[in-house]
Amino acid sequence: MSEEQIRSLEREFDAKIARDEKIEPKDWMPEKYRKTHIRQMSQHAHSEIVGMLPEGNWITRAPSLRRKVALLAKVQDEAGHGLYLYSATETLGISREEMYEQLHTGKAKYSSIFNYPTITWADMGAIGWLVDGAAIINQVPLCNTSYGPYARAMIRVCKEESFHQRQGFEIMMKLANGTPEQKEMAQDALNRWWWPSLMMLGPTDDVSVHTEQSMKWKLKRKSNDDLRQQFIDQTVPQADLIGLTVPDPDLKWNEERGSYDFGEIDWDEFWQVVKGHGPMNKERMKARVGAWERGEWVRDAAMAHAEKKQARKEKQVV
Amino acid sequence: MSAKNWPLWEIFVRSKNGLEHRHCGSLHAADSDMALENARDVYTRRNEGVSIWVVESKHITASNPENNGELFEPAQDKVYRHPTFYDLPDEVKHM
């Protein structure tokens, strides 16, 4: 194809997205669109899969059956969300094995928030309330993204996500209204998860490299800073409501802006964790790769069994 | 690396009787029985379905968007296939 032809296809492609039409798997798309989507969607899928690990840590120790079934269902949803997203990404021509390979070798990233430890039960509350809360803010605009399979997967994900946040907030509320020790536990979890949750919404707009192109492709509808402000404005009153204190001495309602002003985020910490030096990076990858390797014989046995059954069926036909 | 990877299956779910099966996504499974079981866990955790179809993806033949012109454009100028093409007096009701 000549360069002129490609440029004309690109113009038609951009116009299609501007008209709010969806791009489907077999449609022509610029190579950069395909690559960017594979990167973002597979990272999103990896985050769901790795995101099961910090919470899986507490399933056997949930304080009641009610909490246990809810946590199990939430972790199962995350597995489901990972699968929706992996299969949507496969429509762009990358195989599942390749994506796993990228995750396991560290070539592909996942959300940095999952590299923090879950040391008390209150962390289950903080994750649902804050981490899923931040995720929802990030994900809702993606229901209208330009790539059809991604948008459809996100609609399913968003429908299921609100239970996650509500169950987390309920855990926090219960602890905050409990004994002084329980309230302290809830406060401690908020202290540890607040800043990483703000970082989760991504670097500030002045250093974020992908924003402009992603906005055009509707891979992003709002900037990181706008999303962060939205998260803070919606979460602070929720903390007030259950009597917990957001660990930011600079947090202050700004009447003029109609938003909260907030303190400086420690971006060095964020980049350290992204680069693999967070408290749990090694542990998470060890658990993930270990699960994959220990499952290999099961996958092979299932395939061998399926082939045997198929062969038997064919023999009967003859 | 596994000896052989599980093939890909397309999943169709009927949300309730009276409605058609609708494509809802895909998954990997060793065979059709496992594809059905996995589809139940992945796509119907909240009463989304009363019936599931699974089809191995390789068996689906899809039209190519490059041929959309010859496939679908001819229908565009056949306005006489629509009831509004025909002029009737206002006195004729319910037709």
Image (cartoon, rainbow, N blue to C red):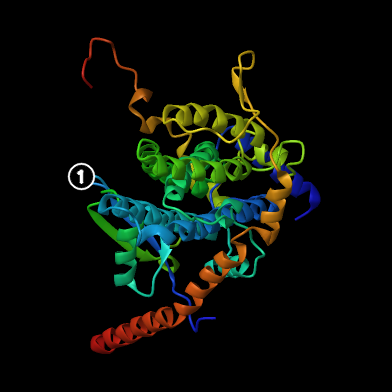
Q: Quick one: label 1, few (<14), some, or many (20+) residues within 10 Å?
A: few
Can you give x and y, in whole percent of width and height, for residue B18 in the image? 20, 44
- Tell me: residue A106, above or below residue A212: below
Can you give x and y, in whole percent of width and height, for residue A186 in the image? 45, 42
Residue depicted at x 37% and y 80%: A302
Q: Which residue is mark 1?
A: B18
Residue depicted at x 55% and y 27%: A233
Can you give x and y, in whole percent of width and height, for residue A56 in the image? 42, 60
Q: Is residue A251 left or right of residue A300?
A: right
Residue depicted at x 23% and y 10%: B91
Q: Chain of mark 1?
A: B
* Quadrant of the snapshot with the N terminus of chain A: bottom right
- Tell me: residue B89, above or below residue A180: above
Q: In which quadrant of the rendered view does residue B59 lie?
A: bottom left
Front residue (pair A239, B31): A239
Front residue (pair A95, A296): A296
- Tell me: residue A134, above or below residue A256: below
* Quadrant of the snapshot with the C terminus of chain A: bottom left
- Tell me: residue A108, above or below residue A188: below
Front residue (pair A16, A155): A155
Can you give x and y, in whole percent of width and height, for residue A30 in the image? 68, 50
Residue depicted at x 64% and y 61%: A108
Can I make out residue A284 in this image? yes
Can I make out residue A26 in this image? no
- In the rendered image, the residue lying farthest to the front is A180
Kind of residue at disc 1: Gly
Q: In which quadrant of the rendered view does residue A100 lie?
A: bottom right
- In the rendered image, the residue lying farthest to the right is A3
Mark count: 1
Label 1: which secondary element: loop
Q: Is residue A195 left or right of residue B75?
A: right
Front residue (pair A178, A34): A178
